[in-house]
Amino acid sequence: MNRREFFALLGGAAAWPLAVRAQQGSRIPRVGVLWHAGNAEQEGSNFTALVKGFADLGYVEDRTIVLENRFPNERPDQFRSMPAELVASGVDVLVAVGANALRTPRKRPPPSRWFSPWCARSPGQQT
């Protein structure tokens, strides 16, 4: 499976609960994305692939889906605070990109749904 197919699958898996929720009303689904780098440019092709994956599924950013991106710049304090910030903002799904995004926040409030394609174990399991 190539990177593009992988991110299309990721987008579909993350968006699936949003599609169900979207059918229940006209509210635009909000996806919180916790990256690892300092900005979208540093994330490079991963950032582009995620946005394209959602677009390939028919989601148009800021029209049919809102992506709440957070870039902790590899700072442990940001990895601890940003998941709670995203949950407090009311995201429907939280996508964690990379092991650090899942490993650092030991006690985090649960969003509606956590999703990480880069994790072999459940985000709730201790390391």
Image (cartoon, rainbow, N blue to C red):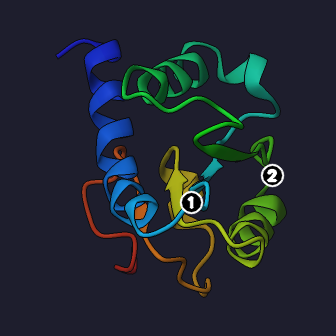
> Is residue 36 found left or right of 81 in the rendered image?
left
Residue 28 coordinates in the image, percent (x, y): 61, 54
Q: Amino acid at mark 1?
A: Ser
Residue shown at the point (49%, 18%) measured from the top left: 52
Residue shown at the point (34%, 45%) measured from the top left: 117
Q: Amino acid at mark 2?
A: Arg
Residue shown at the point (48%, 23%) measured from the top left: 55
- Compared to residue 52, the image places residue 62 above or below, namely below
Q: Residues within 10 Å of mark 2 (few under 14, many from 20)?
A: few
Quick one: label 2 or label 1, which is nearer the N terminus?
A: 1
- Compared to residue 101, the image places residue 24 above or below, namely below
Quarter of the image where the N terminus is located: top left
> Is residue 60 found left or right of 55 in the rendered image?
right
> Is residue 50 found left or right of 66 in the rendered image?
left
Task: Quadrant for residue 65, please give it.
Answer: top right
Residue 82 coordinates in the image, percent (x, y): 76, 64
Answer whether labels 2 and 1 touch (C-beta < 8 Å): no
For mark 2, give the secondary structure.
loop
- Compared to residue 107, the image places residue 15 above or below, namely above
Number of labels in the image equals 2
Residue 111 coordinates in the image, percent (x, y): 54, 77
The residue pinned by badge 1 equals: 26
Front-most of 117 and 73?
A: 117
Residue 35 coordinates in the image, percent (x, y): 64, 42
Front-most of 23 and 15?
A: 23
Quarter of the image where the C terminus is located: bottom left
For mark 1, give the secondary structure.
loop
The residue pinned by badge 2 equals: 75
Front-most of 107 and 127?
A: 107
Closer to the observer: label 2 or label 1?
A: 1
Residue shown at the point (33%, 62%) measured from the top left: 20
